[in-house]
Image: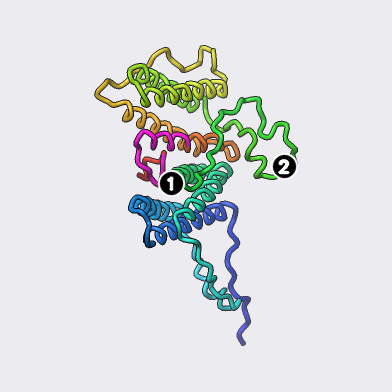
Amino acid sequence: MRLETPPPTEPVPDAAEVVRRTAVADALLVADQAEGAAGAEGIPSDVAAELELIAEATTLQAQQLGGEYDSGLGDIVAEDAGASPSATTPEQTPRAVVRSLRDAATRTRAAADQAQAGPLGRLLGSVSAAQALYARDLAQLTGARGPALPPTEIPEPDAEPGDGEDASASPAAAATGPAAVPTGLSAEELDALILAEDSAAYALEVRAAQADGEVRTRAYDRARLHRARAQGWAVVAGTDGSDQDPRRVAYAVPGSDTATPDLARGLEEDLAQNYATLIGLAEPGTRAVLVALLTDATMAGAQWGAPAVPFPGLPERA
């Protein structure tokens, strides 16, 4: 006598697996759309080249995120349920790719903030920064609307997320409010970040004084931002104006054999690495401003000539 056993069912994924699968699905959707759009008739060569770059990068992102999950039960479950494959085909145009990148960057950025595992949050933060940059670059080539970038203002220690907002507000509405102060970071880690921002400001101030035209303006504007961020992090650390404040009067600056764009690019890439590292260390729900600043440093580095890469701030995945 043979006992009947219940039919196999797909395992129920936990929250971390849902986050991972969503990020993989987003990356593969973009890769599929970009590959299809690049081969379409009448696509300008520069747009096609950017689409091919995006397809390659997002395929690599999906792989590094663990790829598509396959329990081996998919065909059995689908057959038992009488399911049929979906006939829906995503739109494969450059503008559709921009839209998908915008959406993916927003979702992945939120996931990076909330992921329970620090290493996954760090990887997601890097992927979201890359998606935002690819969206911006392709939008500029096609005239499409670029990505909405997250606020980069460093929250004050006594400010609570959503102060003054209705506690019943939706998550989407809450996301537009003040970011949480990152927690879980040591005094040494904050000191290193303060020094990185302050030394970048000093180097760019020196170079702005030596330059003219657009280079001078851009260097000066970024120097002001980095100086303000050093101040903001010193307030967060509680060292502003104290004997423990790590900021210095002056820093060593590379000589004139290093061109200002090269110097600025290196500074922004170093800051991207700093912020990516801190994303992996900060507690879930307090990483939003770190992810935003990783995105900002990635964007700024690109404006100084840094190439777009699939994993900004993660040198081990270069």
- Residue 119 showing in the rendered view: no
The percent coordinates of residue 243 (x first, y second) are: 51, 12
Q: Which mark is residue 121?
A: none
User: Which residue carries the number 2 mark?
Assistant: 169
Label 2 or label 1, whichever lies nearer to me, is: 1
User: Which residue carries the number 1 mark?
Assistant: 134
- Residue 139 showing in the rendered view: yes
Q: Position of 301 compared to 9: left or right?
A: left
Q: Earlier in the sequence, mark 2 or mark 1?
A: 1
Q: Position of 317 compared to 277: left or right?
A: left
Q: Secondary structure at mark 1?
A: helix
- Circle 1 packing at 10 Å, graded few (<14), some (14-19), many (20+), is many
- Three-letter code, disc 2: Ala
Is the residue 11 above or below the residue 315 in the image? below
Is the residue 299 above or below the residue 92 in the image? above
The percent coordinates of residue 242 (x first, y second) are: 54, 13
